[in-house]
Image: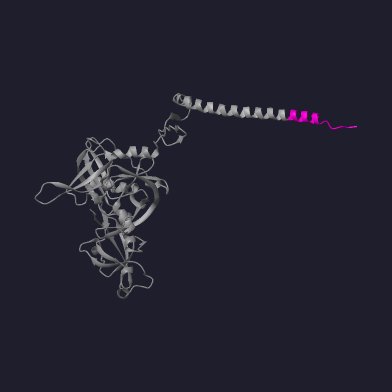
Amino acid sequence: MGYYDENHENDQDSKENGHQSRETHVRGGWFLSGFIGAIVGMVCLLIFAPILSDLGVFPYQVSTGAQNTNNVGNTTFNRQMNVNVTSSVTEAVDKVSPAVVAVINLQKANFFDNKYTESGIGSGIIYKKDNQYAYVVTNNHVVSGAEKVEVRLNDNVKTNATVLGKDSLYDLAVLRISSKNVKSVAEFGNSSKLKRGEPAIAIGNPLGFSGSVTQGIISSTNRTIPVESNNASIETQVLQTDAAINPGNSGGALVNIAGQVIGINSSKIASTGTGSNDDVEGIGFAIPIDFAKTVIEKLETSGKVQRPMLGVSIVDLTMVPNEEVKQLQLPSSVKTGLVVTDVQSSSPAAKSGLEAGDVITEINGHKIKSYIEFSTYMYTELNAGQKVTIKYYRMGKSHTTQLTLGSKTFS
């Protein structure tokens, strides 16, 4: 027969309570030991971390006290970063900069005073050097009107310059200086191989800040903008970049990542291309070096660029009022051409029989679409002294004539 022993049950409870008490004691001891260990570890870290850092064991420098802003408690972790700032851009700048100079336009204050004052400042590129001379290309408008020109080299040494030749149509000029203090010559690249989006670096003296560098990309490799000079208008091909080009950058270098000159910067062309005198950001233009080379060579050797000439004054047919167009009695199929308003005596046009009132529609088989398109074609595709065939209309009848193109310069 079973029975209930209260004392036995109490003894059993006592044993279980004792066992639980021992487990609680053990767990509490482990927690206390871990906590004390963590404190000891942190103290050791504070003591020995700076020493280990100095020995190069840590990848960063550790110091005690509030020396920098990245604080953890009373400890400052100051990571030492050895950053290599040398890149393709800085290498390109270092390569070209010594050959980029300041070009100073000097003029007399008055006729009786023999002192020259600075009228303007631009940039230039030393592209050639021999034992006696060095040659600098710049923009025509940088030296326009100058009575004296000085070139300030990269090391701030000034030297007098001789203007060998100027071309206002493409805004280029070539100067000659002594090669005595010239230490570097720029390398011309190939502008025909440029791609949109590739890096472009402009180097020059914007607003008089010597040796300034701006970086961007080639925005367009084949932008065409109108340029006017001496009553002649043409469309010229330029490089477009978002590298900042400001007054003073004119004549300076547009450089590729290899440190080669790919264009000659022109703030004048930039203002013409935007069609506004307002400040424009992110749009700059440069004369492609492949095109500039031909002009530079001619200016250096002969002092001028001979361009073809007809010897006529003309107006775009599309600009003539309808009532006057009717008087020309043109066939309905003739929509474009050039109306001759005057013929210079003894000119190629006069010798060929062209008269005022004639409407020129073709030259050497090239159909004329507009005045500016015709000028561009003539100044880029034809040469002075070349024999050409002209198609024109006189009082509604078609005629052809041949003439030998004359020559003129834009200086």
Q: Is residue 236 left or right of residue 30?
A: left
- Measuring 15% from the left and 47% from the top, which residue is drawn there? 116
Q: Quadrant of residue 24?
A: top right
Coordinates of residue 123 in the picture (x, y in percent)? 27, 45
Q: Which residues are magenta?
A: 1-16
- The quadrant of the picture occupied by the N terminus is top right
Coordinates of residue 193 in the picture (x, y in percent)? 40, 46
Coordinates of residue 372 in the picture (x, y in percent)? 32, 61
Coordinates of residue 207 in the picture (x, y in percent)? 27, 48
Farthest left residue in view: 112
Secondary structure, magenta segment, majority class: helix
Farthest front residue in view: 7
On screen, residue 92 above or below 250: above
**Could one spot residue 304 in this view of the protein?**
no
**Could one spot residue 161 in this view of the protein?**
yes
Q: What color scheme is it?
A: one colour
- Measuring 31% from the left and 39% from the top, which residue is drawn there? 97
- Decide which of 263, 313 is in the foreground and name it: 263
- Decide which of 125, 304 is in the foreground and name it: 125
Magenta-drawn stretch contains 11: yes
Farthest right residue in view: 1
Magenta-drawn stretch contains 15: yes
Mark count: 0
- Decide which of 290, 24 is in the foreground and name it: 24
Q: Quadrant of residue 36?
A: top right
